[in-house]
Image (spheres, helix red, strand yellow):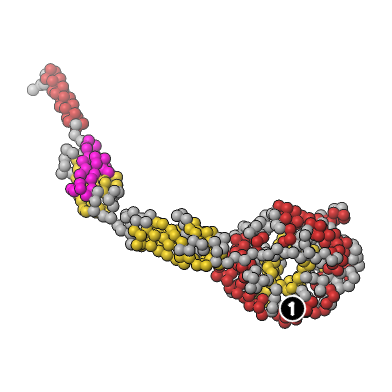
Amino acid sequence: MKMTKRLFLYLLGLAAFVGLMTSCAKEDKFTQVSSLSFSSTPSSLAPGQTHKLQVKAFPADADEPYTLVFASSKPEVATVDAQGTVTAIKDGQTVISVSLKDRPEVKAEFTLMVETIEITGVEFTQKVDALYMGETTTITAKVLPENATEAGTLEYTSSQTEVATITQTGYITALEAGTTVITATVKERPEIKATFTLTVKPLYKAPKNTKFQKVGYFPSYRDLAAMPDEFLQMYTVACYSFAKLNKDYTLTVEKPDKLREFVTRCKALGIKVLICFGGGGSGADGSYAAMAASPENRAKFITSLKTIVETYDLDGVDNDWEYPRTTDGSDKGNTALMRELSTWLHDPAENKLLTMAITSGKYTGAVASAIETECFDYVDWFNVMCYDNYLGWANMDPKSLALDMMSTGYNYWVGTRKMPKYKFVGGISAYGRPSDEEHNGTPVSYVEILRQGGRPDGYKAEVSTAKYTGTVYYNGQPFVKEKTRYCIDQGVGGVMFWDAGQDTQDDRSLIQAACDEAGDYTDLP
């Protein structure tokens, strides 16, 4: 039977209508939420604490519109608002739940404990066993356990406020020698506290140098016995060089028998003898920095120094560490070392000298800045090495050479750094150097310069050594007199020679020239 055209069109329209209705039905059907979960839940809260809950719906692509309803089984223990913020009220246990408003069977829940975690103790997290008078530091403490919910405000006290005071921020100021008990107490629970004993040690500083010093360094490798008394006695202070640093941070005297003989001679002549540690390049391997970096290592070092000073009946100590630097933190270690040496040596019961050899300051920076201003308090005087920079002397006016390095050193340490004048002792070299860059590091002793034809009244000479042949510049007697006069006129603490063994022992002597210029000048202004 043939379908009429009218029937065909009717059926076609019916099919289109059914398809449209089916499509609309599909668009009205949503993917439903099948479950809920909390992203994270607190195991416990303390009364007063809050926590914002985060809820996830599954499946992730569900597009069913829904409203979450939060509830607490015991609102007297903890409440939860419509946005999911839980507020702990009092100690106890409650069930926190979340569900769909239209389908409450879809839900998630967890048990919340509300509890107060009590403070059980106090612990110092940073403290100090000892300070020197005038020192300050900050200590810290904490309540235990660290998750305590109980209020815990710490209060600090010192049992002996005349010995040391402490602020409520833990800042301690050491005032006078003695001991005090530092206490950290929980303000809300005063029975809970922690204590430690602080020792404040006396800090002895250097007295004022009142004499114009003539300092000489006497290396152990020189023939000290051959130096006549008449030249030796021109010095007021002799630095025996060196005591060498061992791997365990103790010191060993080089040629102890020579030191013993030298001390006997000097004592008879009224010359003070110091033991010198360090020397050129002594800081290169980091051993001095390592020694000075820790209180334990410094203690071993100083103990060995005390033994040396006592054994050989010495008058003090000279620090020739070359060099502490700001770049590796050894500046702080050096300051601590000098503070501790001063406390020992300047104790009235000891009454000994503490001196230090330092750079001239021509090249300011890591080395010069490493001598912190605090050290000025601890050192009797500084032997300022106003030498070794002969570069460019070949092109300079000879009249300006004598004071080129001496005035530079004075201007830096006294002028810029405000070192007290009486602590500045101007260094003079008993050797010469070439002026060119390549050979400037090659020294030639004053004795050798004279032996090869140099003049005692000159400042340059032609020499030939195994390492160098050419012109060297040096301190002849006129230069030494000019430098000595400069030091006298400036009112500084004296002059120093490195080293006495490179000088002559006759009428061409450099120390003789200094003494001649100084005359009877002995007392500083």
Tell me if residue 327 can be seen.
yes
* Magenta span of residues: 58-85
Amino acid found under the numbered disc labelled 1: Val
Tell me if residue 126 can be seen.
no
Quadrant occupied by the C terminus: bottom right
Query: Residue at position x 41%, y 57% from top?
Result: 155
**Picture quadrant of residue 412:** bottom right
Looking at the image, residue 34 sits to the left or right of residue 467; the answer is left
Query: Residue at position x 77%, y 75% from top?
Result: 270
- Is residue 77 covered in magenta? yes
- Is residue 498 covered in magenta? no
> Which is nearer the eye, 440 or 183?
183
* Image height of 288 relative to 44, above or below: below
> Which is nearer the eye, 224 or 166?
166
Query: Residue at position x 72%, y 61% from top?
Result: 423
Looking at the image, residue 457 sits to the left or right of residue 71; the answer is right
Of all residues, the one furthest to the top in this rendering is 6
* Image height of 77 relative to 382, above or below: above
Q: Position of residue 6 (x, y in %)?
A: 12, 17
**Picture quadrant of residue 388:** bottom right
Quadrant occupied by the N terminus: top left
Q: Secondary structure at mark 1?
A: helix
Q: Position of residue 465 (x, y in %)?
A: 84, 68
Looking at the image, residue 209 sits to the left or right of residue 185; the answer is right
Of all residues, the one furthest to the front in this rendering is 162
Q: Which residue is mark 1?
A: 263
> Which is nearer the eye, 226 or 328?
226
Count of numbered circles on the image: 1
